[in-house]
């Protein structure tokens, strides 16, 4: 009987959050271990379906770097990176589209639908969802200050959320691969964190949630920082608390907050049911960055 009562208490404790968030949009960037390990994939799909059933409108943006690397090697191409960005020639872009828009996207759609959801796979090219422009990076080596061309790597120029509005209105869960289209119809590979941020901004989402492979942002003593006001982000970047792979995630969060997203979260996707733990508990499990 005690176990049954504990289940009832959990549901009662969740009720205020369900009431607050019903009808609201959550944009979730799905990647890392949660996208690779079988049990974590299953728990993610269950979480998304549950959110949808209680009236929250999830929108999923996914990456897929490890699978792109694997496919490139199978096809005799060695992945090359400059300042963390994948050098993307036309042949590599074909592989990116095949892996992200095909293999990865459809696997996520099938997982969600297998648990009773109604997911629909999209790329940024569909219905003009994601307009892109070429991304150029500055050389930090011997030719410092020069611009480096890394191929068909893009950044978000604009978002047209019309197709997302239609899908969400009818109870569908959009699952989006981060491929944009340029002014001449060319495809661009875009960082999934930045795409999720731009989509959350365009939808004026309640939350932007980024899944990663660390517990959150840690202070100098190694303790996870539960909440960071946006005004303190620069300080953490300047003193090195935020660096490396965490930097684009924090930048994605601050951009979303500046565009009107209510709260942003960086959470550990290696924890089963991490979405439910972050959303429906007071403490949460990662770092929230707030306006």
Image: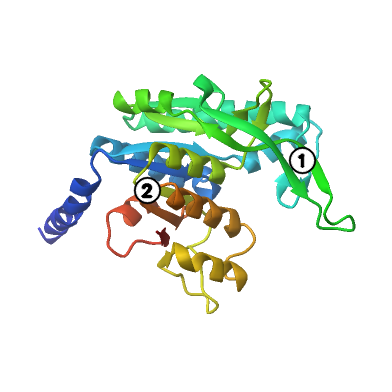
Q: Which residue is mark 2?
A: 207
Above or below, comparing residue 133 to residue 30 in the picture: above
**x, y percentage for residue 56?**
28, 39
Quarter of the image where the C terminus is located: bottom left
Whether residue 189 can be seen here: yes
- Mark 2 packing: few (<14 Cα in 10 Å), some, or many (20+)? many
Disc with the residue nearer the chain's start (2 vs 1): 1
The residue tagged with tag 2: helix, strand or loop?
A: strand
Compute the Cα span from label 2 to label 1.
Answer: 31 Å
- Mark 1 packing: few (<14 Cα in 10 Å), some, or many (20+)? some
**x, y percentage for residue 226?**
40, 67
Q: Which residue lies at the image location 62% right of the left edge and 32% below the top edge?
A: 132
Q: Is 223 left or right of 241, judged from the image as shown?
A: left
Q: Which residue lies at the image location 71% right of the left edge and 26% below the top edge?
A: 94
Q: Which residue is mark 1?
A: 87
Q: Which residue lies at the image location 89% right of the left edge and 55% below the top edge?
A: 143
Whether residue 271 can be seen here: no
In this view, the residue farthest toward the right is: 142
Q: How many marks?
A: 2
**x, y percentage for residue 193?**
54, 46
**x, y percentage for residue 276?**
32, 51
| Nearest to viewer (mark 2 / mark 1) | 2
């Amino acid at each position: 009987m005690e176990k049954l009562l504990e289940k009832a208490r959990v549901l009662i404790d969740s009720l205020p959050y369900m009431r607050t968030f019903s009808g609201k949009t959550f944009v979730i960037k799905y990647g890392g271990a949660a996208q690779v390990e079988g049990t974590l994939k299953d728990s993610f799909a269950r979480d998304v379906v549950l959110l949808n059933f209680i009236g929250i409108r999830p929108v999923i943006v996914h990456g897929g770097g490890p699978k792109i690397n694997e496919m490139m090697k199978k096809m005799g191409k060695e992945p090359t990176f400059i300042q963390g960005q994948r050098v993307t020639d036309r042949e590599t872009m074909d592989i990116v589209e095949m892996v992200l828009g095909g293999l990865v996207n459809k696997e996520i759609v099938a997982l969600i639908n297998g648990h009773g959801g109604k997911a629909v796979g999209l790329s940024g090219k569909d219905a003009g969802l994601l307009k892109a422009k070429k991304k150029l990076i500055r050389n930090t080596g011997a030719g410092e200050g020069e611009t480096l061309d890394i191929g068909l790597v893009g950044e978000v120029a604009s978002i047209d959320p019309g197709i997302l509005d239609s899908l969400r209105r009818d109870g569908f869960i959009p699952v989006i691969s981060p491929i944009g289209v340029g002014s001449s119809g060319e495809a661009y590979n875009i960082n999934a964190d930045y795409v999720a941020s731009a989509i959350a901004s365009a939808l004026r989402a309640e939350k932007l949630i980024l899944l990663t492979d660390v517990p959150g942002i840690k202070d100098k003593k190694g303790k996870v920082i539960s909440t960071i006001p946006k005004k303190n982000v620069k300080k953490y970047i300047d003193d090195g608390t935020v660096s490396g792979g965490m930097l684009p995630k924090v930048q994605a969060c601050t951009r979303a907050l500046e565009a009107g997203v209510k709260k942003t979260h960086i959470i550990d996707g290696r924890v089963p049911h991490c979405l439910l733990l972050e959303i429906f508990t007071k403490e949460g499990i990662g770092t929230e960055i707030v306006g």
